[in-house]
Structure formats: structure tokens, C-alpha cells
Amino acid sequence: MTWVNAVVHGILLGGYYALLATGLSLMFGVMRIINLAHGSLALVGAYMTFLVAEHADVSTYVALVPVLAGALLIGYALQRTMLERSLRSGELVPLLATFGLLIVIANVLQRAFSPDVRSLSAGSIGTASWRLTSSLTISWFDVLVLGIAIVVLVGLQLLLVHTQAGRELRATAADPDTAELLGVNSRAVYARAAAIAVATAALAGVFYAMRSNFDPSAGPTQLIYAFEAVIIGGIGSLWGTLVGGIVLGVAQTVGAQIDVQYFALAGHLVFLAVLTFRAIAQAGAFRSFGKVVA
Amino acid sequence: MTALAPRPTSAPVRVERWTPLSGVFTAALVVLVVVLAFAPRLFGQGTLDNLVELYFLVILAIMWNALAGYGGLVSIGQQAFIGIGAYAVVFLSVQHSLNPYLAMLLATLIGAGISIPIAGVVLWLRGGAFAIGTWVVAEIFAILVSLDASLGGGTGTSAVLAFNLRYTPEQRLRNTYWFALAAAAASLVILFLLLRSRLGAALQAIRDDEEAAASVGVRVLFGKGVLFVLAGAGCTAAGAIILAWQLSILPLGPDSVFGVNWTAKMIFMVLVGGLGTFEGPIVGAIVLYLLETYTATPLGVWYLVMLGSIAIGVALFAPKGIWGTVQERFGIQLLPVGYRLRRRA
Amino acid sequence: MTTTLLAVERIDSRHGLLQAVREVSLEIQEGETVALVGANGAGKTTLLRTIAGAHRPSGGRVLFAGEDVTGVPAYRRARLGIALVPEGRKLFPELTVEENLRVAAAARREGRWTVDEVLEAFPLLQPLRRKRAASLSGGEQQATAIGRALMTNPRLLLLDEVSLGLAPLAVEALYHAIEALVAGGTTILLVEQDLARAMRVAGRVICMLEGRLVLEGEAARLSREQVTDAYFGLRTGATAGGGGA
């Protein structure tokens, strides 16, 4: 694999990360909840699709449909039962409650499905690739994932800007109390956002399972990557999440190009570097601003 | 307009730190520690082994509570220090032939030292970003260690040589027991003194409202830094004890010393015991210890599911934890870290 | 025959441990304009928020058009026709003026108020349709906030200190629009610090002090002195020896 190939691969990988991170970004942007179980929920999507595909003897793509519907319901229910309640006790508690959920999901999955490594069939697209030049090969599947990620992001953006539901969502995210005064049921808005978040997570989880092997312990790792993508791209911006995903993807694939074992490490180091740089820039900006004013 | 009421000649309330109950309890605690020091004479190997586990759980709980309960810093990466502690002891005692207990002491200092640059990176972050940032730091350490062949790489390493060449298994257990007891007691004492000091009041102010605290001159970053270094040192000590206790360690996987399951246990202990109270983490550690000793083997994989579910339940329905609820209901404080106002008779 | 649109019966409301509203009862007829005056901390905002459903009372009842709405959450009260323009305007900063207005469609009420109608009533907003709310001036924000509440086509409009922090010219323009609303028959309960304005625009005046209702009467029949005395808690017609520096 050459460097160019690695970078292109990283960009395509970024599409997957963006899709995975969208739900995380949405939940944080609207409800200020950091769902540490997000990666685990994505994995549940993969396992559910596996179950449906096996038992109904259909392709992964067909199995996706009921799984996504189920994910919408799960997200809605999760918000109305657990997340809504945990928010009342302050910002710390949702972190703790979702962490508990992460542990529960990882271990229930392990019990239900055994620690064996599995993979979901991606059909003929899964193996198809496109040889651009002698050193650059692109997998059709990766392009599909990036394409779907962009479609989802565009769709969300359109929803937020051009529909009443989107306006209510943005209003509730800014000021839930005032939104209520205008007739907006903020709890329902939050639940809808959570539903979308879990559904996109499940979709991303299925794609993950199709492109690589997965096992019950994969949830936390994917969560870290998703979170890194969100933070690199800037919290609160949907397109920032795409950028963040791509930066992370490229960092990882380039790192892997140097040494296969450096894949995750490279991503982590870039993540910390971006954070530190941004934090220093913020602190520096405030300090110099203070000097000008004082 | 009537004139203002005359000012009383002496304040109608008195500020106290100790109550009779807390005095008695603190004295009892000191006696208990002394008695426990004689445990090797009183109890068998199995009990000593269990007590070592209880002690390092207490240390971990106290440290996590110090960060989250008193500093508002939710860290999911303290396992970085547990791993650093364990591997530092191996490095010093196996590769450099240091006495393992001396190595454990040095490891604690090393951990405290490493926590400073880490603090420099992560303390800028808030809330969820801080949480994930600390986790990423732990993952980085885990990966670096797993890539280092001299430390055993991905398959792990052990300190069997360092201990068994010098001590019999009974001696190892005894010495580890005393080290663990001393470390746990020291952690309690240090945190106690810290909370009673001016910095302690500052920390509580930071926890309640960071900006307000900063506006009255509290050095927020310094306060958080002190907590972070203390927690780093404490978790490193715990990691060293864990190494001495189980002898072989792994850098990756669910049972690794760098594993996020350690944080799961810390969160459980502090949540169930009582976040932000002094006695809470001790209560939580005892609860976890009892659960682990009596339910872990029969439950198998469901053990962690149970722990996670209890954590969720407590977070949703009883966020104050056992001790927090007791303290709120009865106003008891067994260890005097707060202030009380008492009306003069 | 006018109907009693709003009936507040012995409402008690707390702010944490502080009793902000004590046993307040009042009635508002459809089509009336009532001014609620009082010093800072008298409980006016809390009372308004309790009526709108943003604050739960610890005692008493709120009846709207004969129905007991005491337990009804705020968003459903908006759908019933109670609209509150909150203190401090509270626009959604990143949404445009038009988007702020259109959020109110959540109240699902039909009526004469549409985006175009609001822009006609507040012409200063016409060039600002697509501007971010955060970039507006105080007067423009207040107009948007009132327009946004109107977009819910309310039966009862609650205005909380709409002139606060605004330049005199902006206040003039605002009250011009409010007077048009009054003339149009909208039922209004407004909190206002400026006594003169309050008594000019309202048919009835209510004064609160430390959580209680201390004075109530027709604006035309009350004198400035009566209201001022009630405002500050001084006894009217005091005997010698009371008051003083």
C-alpha cells in the first residue's frame, strides 16, 4: 500500500466515523448528554442485523430495515426512561448511567453471542474494488459508506433547517424552557433526537460489521473513535463531524502505513494534539483579549 | 421607621469541626488500623489475601471520589495509573533487580511524576471531553506498553521472579498486606488533611461553581492539579499492590491492568457508596468487595452485568448513594471534614 | 357578556425556599388589559410564569376559560392559548427572526397571526427577517419576542417587563404596537416598571408587594399616589408618627 492509497483509505474510513459520530454529536448538541454507550448501541445494531439475516435468511441489507426501525424505538425509549431522568441530577449522572449501560451491553452481548469474532456479509459490493492507478485501489463498499454518511448528514441538515420539527429541535437545544412556552413538547423533541441518534449508530454499526470483524468487546473502542471524530471536528457542528472523521481516519491509516500496530495510537496522538492546541489557543486568546481590554 | 435591632454582644452560633460522634469514630478508626496491622498474626492466608483486595479497592474508590466528588472531574482513565504502577514495579524489580517493595514505593513516586504532564494535557478539558481525554491517555499507555517487547508486549509479563527469589509466598503476602494497609491508611489521612485545609474548602467551592470560585480568587487549575496528582499517585500505588497481589499482568484485553473495567469498579464503588462524601467510597469499596467475594464466581459473566445495572439504578434513583442518603437523612458525619453550626444554649 | 378568561385562586409559589407568591387571587375578563406592578422581587415574574405553566405552584389553582390548568405543563397551556413573553426576551440566538417566529407553530393554533401579519404589526422587523436573532438590537429583539408569542394566536398574552433595558424611542414604538393589540381586543396581562405607562395602557391595575396583592382597581379611578404607596408598602392616609426618614 502506498501513501496515496493510505490517505484515500483514510478519507473513506472517515465517512464511517462521521456516520458513527453523528448520533453522538446530535445527542450532545441537543441534550448535552454524552452517551458513553453509543458505540455499544452501534454494536447491538450489528448483532441484531446478524440475527435477523440468519433467522430470516435474508441479505444484510434487507435485515437492516427492521433493525433500523427497532433502533428508532430503542433510542426513543432510552431517552424517555433512562436519559431524561439522569439529566435531572446534573451533568455528571448521565455520564455514569451511560457508562453503566456500556458495561451491561458489552457483557450481555458476550453472554448471548460468545466472544467469537464474526462478520456480516456485504454481498457483492463487499469485495468489489476499483483500480484507479497501479498504486491506488478503492473499495466500492467504502465509497458506499462515505456516500451514505454524506446523505445522512445532508438529510439531517435539511431536516434541521427546513422543517418545523427541525426548527423545534434547534429551539429546544438552545432553550428548552422558552420553547415550551411556545407549545413545543421538549421531552418529545429530545426523544426524537435520541431515536435518530441510535438509528444512525445502528446503521454505522452494521457497516462496521460488514467491513471488518467484530466481537462483543468492540463497542468501547468504536466509541472512543467516534468521540475523537466529534471533538476534532468541533462539538456542535454536523459538518465538523465529517471533517473530524476524515482527519481521524487519515491519521489512523497513515499511522498504519508506518507500522500496522500504530493504527489506533496515531489517531489518539492526533486527537490529543488537536485538543491541546485548541485549549491553548482558547486560553491564549482570552489572555490576550484580557490585556487589550484591561 | 423603627430603629434597627441592637446587635447581640456575642454570636448566637458557634462553628465546630468535631462532634462527639466524629471524635469517637475517628478514634475507633485509628484503633482499627492498629488492630489490622496485627492481622497476619490473627488470620489465615485466605483472609489476608481478601483484605489486600479490599485495601486496594478502598484506595481506588477514595481516589476516584477525590477527582469526581470533590473536583467535579469525571475521569474514565485512571486505569492509566494502575497500569503504570504495575508495570513500573515489574520494570524496577525484574529488570533492575530492585527490592520489589522499594520498587512499589518508587513506582508511586513515578506515577505522581507522570501525572503532572498528563494533567497539563487533560486539565484544560471539561466534562465529557475530559472523560474521553483521560480514557484516550490510558489507551495510549496500554498500546505503548503492548508494543514494548522488553515489558512483555501484548502477552503481558509477571513479577514472579522478583518476589519468589526473595520471599516465600507467606512472606510476600504478609509484606504486601502491610504495604496495602499502610497505603490505604495514608490515602485516607492525606485526603482528610487536604479536605480540612484551605485547599479543601477551595475544592468544594470549585465543585459547586467553578466560575464563582475563580471570581473570589480560588486558584481553580492549581486545586484540580493537586487532586489529579494525588489521584494519580494513589491509583499508581493501587496498581503496584495489584501487581504484588496477582503477580502476572496483561496490557490489553478486559482483564488488563490498563482496562476500563477498573474504572467501572471505581464508578460503582463511589456511586453506590456516596459521591462527594468522605465515608462514601469506603462503604462502596466494602460493598464491592462483598459482592466480588461472594457473587463473582457463581455469576460468571453476569457479574459485570449486575454491577453495571446496579450502577445505572443508583444513578437514576439514588444518586446520593448509601452514605449520601444516610448523611442527608440523619446529618451524621463520622469523619469531621465539614463545618457545623451549633446554637449556643 | 364578557367571560372570565383567567382565574387565579390563592396561588402560592416558591423559589427554592423563598416564598415568592403568597395567596394571590385575581380574575381577568376576556378583552381586558391588566397591568401588574410592583418593586423588584415582589413576585410578579413568578406569578406570570405560574400562570403560563413554567413554574409549579405549591398551593392554589389556575383556571383558564373555566378549566383547571394547574397541573397542565407549559407546552400544553400554549396550545390552549396562554402565551408568555418572558423576562429578558429569550430569543433563540442562532435562529433567524423568521425562524424564531415560526417555532410558534408548535402551539398548533389557528388565527389571524402569521409571519406577514407580525411583520406588519412590527414594521421595524421587516428588513430583519433573515437576520440571526443574536445580532438584533434590544428593541428589535423585544419586538420579535412579542411577535413570536403572538404567532401562537393566544387568547391570553402575558408580557413580562417588555420595556426593560430599551431606549425610550424603542419603548414608544413598542407601546404603540401594544396599544394596537389592546384596541384589537387581545386579553393582556402585563408587568411594567414604568407606572405612568402602565396606568395609561391598562384598564385595571394590580400591585404586588413581597408576594402579596396589596392593591387592585380601575386605572382611571386610582391615583398615582395610591399606587405608589402600595408599591412601596407605605400606608395611605398615615397617622402622625408613621413614616419618616
Image (spheres, grey):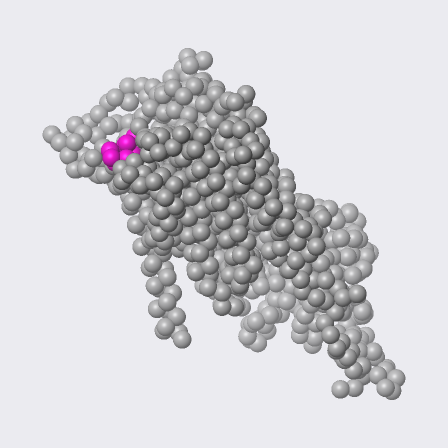
Residue B281, horizontal then vertical, whole percent = 56, 43
Q: How many callouts does the rendering have?
A: 0
Query: Residue C98 placed where, x, y %?
Result: 49, 55
Residue C150 appears anywhere in the view: no
Above or below: residue B209 compared with residue A65:
below
**Which residue is located at x 78 percent, y 75 percent?**
C233
**Which one is in front, C117 or B214?**
B214
Q: Quadrant of residue C148?
A: bottom right
Pick the residue in front: B62 or A280: B62
Q: Position of residue C91 (x, y in %)?
A: 53, 58
Q: Was residue A153 drawn as part of the magenta stretch in this picture?
A: no
Quadrant where the image shows the N terminus of chain C: bottom right
* A233 with respect to B192 (left or right): left
Visible residue check, residue C216: yes
The magenta segment: B146-154
Residue for point 54% across, 61% down: B197
Magenta region, mostly helix, strand or loop? helix
What residue sits 45% from the left and 13% below the top?
A: A55
Judge whether residue B150 is colored magenta.
yes
Q: In which quarter of the image is the C terminus of chain C?
A: bottom right
Q: Where is residue C164 in the image (x, y as percent from the top left)?
A: 60, 70
Tell me what residue is drawn at x 47 percent, y 45 percent.
B183
Give the quarter of the image for residue B294: top right
Pick whichever, A107 or A68, lies toward us.
A107
Task: Specify the farthest residue to the right.
Answer: C239
A114 or C73, nearer to the observer: A114
